[in-house]
Image: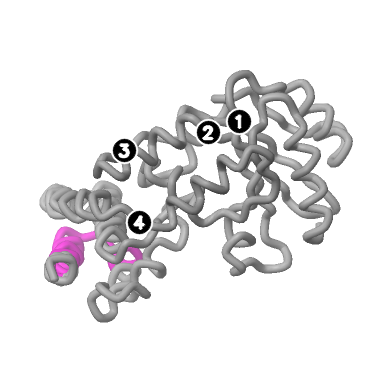
Amino acid sequence: MDDLAVGALAGQLARIPGVVAVALGGSRARGTHRPDSDVDLGLYYRGELDVAALRELAVQVAGEGSTVTEPGGWGPWVDGGAWLTVGGLRVDWIYRDLDRVRRVWAECREGRYEVAVQTGHPLGFYSHAYAGEAALCRVLADPTGELTALRESAQAYPPALGGALVRGLWEAGFCLDLARYGAAGADPVYAAGCLFRAVGVACHALHGRAGRWLINEKGMVASAGRLPPAPPGFAVRAQRLLGRVGESPERIEETVAAAQALLADVRAAVAG
């Protein structure tokens, strides 16, 4: 699909009852995509969404057998949408309740966020991803101008949110304390889980300190490593921790010690 085809599809989606605006998200919105990258379309809706009409449109553009869910079909935060293949390219429709996104944005400005268990998000779904998606998207269809206004507002990363994420770094230290149980019990799976959580929390803290949106876990370590506050070699050191956790108690303990050293550097970086 070229840009014209994506724009035309967005126009069709915007005419579906309940759809308020349509936006391009993901790597294509940021200009970092490959030719085979998915086309992620955010469908911002209000009230009752005409899913039957969406299914009819899905058949028109992708053929029979397309999966289109009801709102909430993918979980409370990812919500729902469609997995389609159009011209050999993966096209995803992703529902977003616009009023809920606006509420989350208000919470972000107050320094409040939550983390929910969500399929497809091993670190958990961070609520402020909603605001980040709006900030980083490319608006394709927005008859009322609501999404455009929200996007413009969300360009200014809330200092209160950044501060909250930095304060949340305490959890990383707690996770590393727990990882020592993995060393003592020769349980590398448990230790790896604790290490992953610690690294993820550190990535969010670094993004918060830098005032940069972090949407999900994919690429979070590389992204954090490019930020001005990141300690030298953060990405390489973090990847090494998860790549070589170890199996023996001694090796796991060495990995946890390296993680604690990295965390100490992160603490110093975000305190500056």
Please say whether residue 73 is one of the residues in the magenta stretch.
no
Marked residue nearer the N-terminal end (3 or 2): 2
Spatial CA distance of label 3 from label 1 is 20 Å
Return the residue nearer the eye: 268 or 248.
268
* Contact between labelled residues 3 and 4, with CB atoms less than 8 Å apart: no
* Contact between labelled residues 4 and 2, with CB atoms less than 8 Å apart: no
- Figure quadrant of residue 264: bottom left
Q: Which residue is mark 3?
A: 107
Give the amino acid at mark 1. Answer: Tyr
Above or below, 114 against 47 in this view is: below
Q: Which residue is mark 4?
A: 157
Marked residue nearer the N-terminal end (3 or 1): 1
Please say whether residue 253 is one of the residues in the magenta stretch.
yes
Q: Which residue is mark 1?
A: 45
Above or below, 3 against 228 in this view is: above
In the rendered image, is residue 176 in sight?
no
Give the amino acid at mark 4. Answer: Tyr
Spatial CA distance of label 3 from label 2 is 14 Å
Residues rendered magenta in the picture = 241-261
Q: Residue at x 64, y 37 (%)?
A: 144
Q: Main secondary structure of the magenta part?
A: helix
Q: Which residue is mark 2?
A: 98
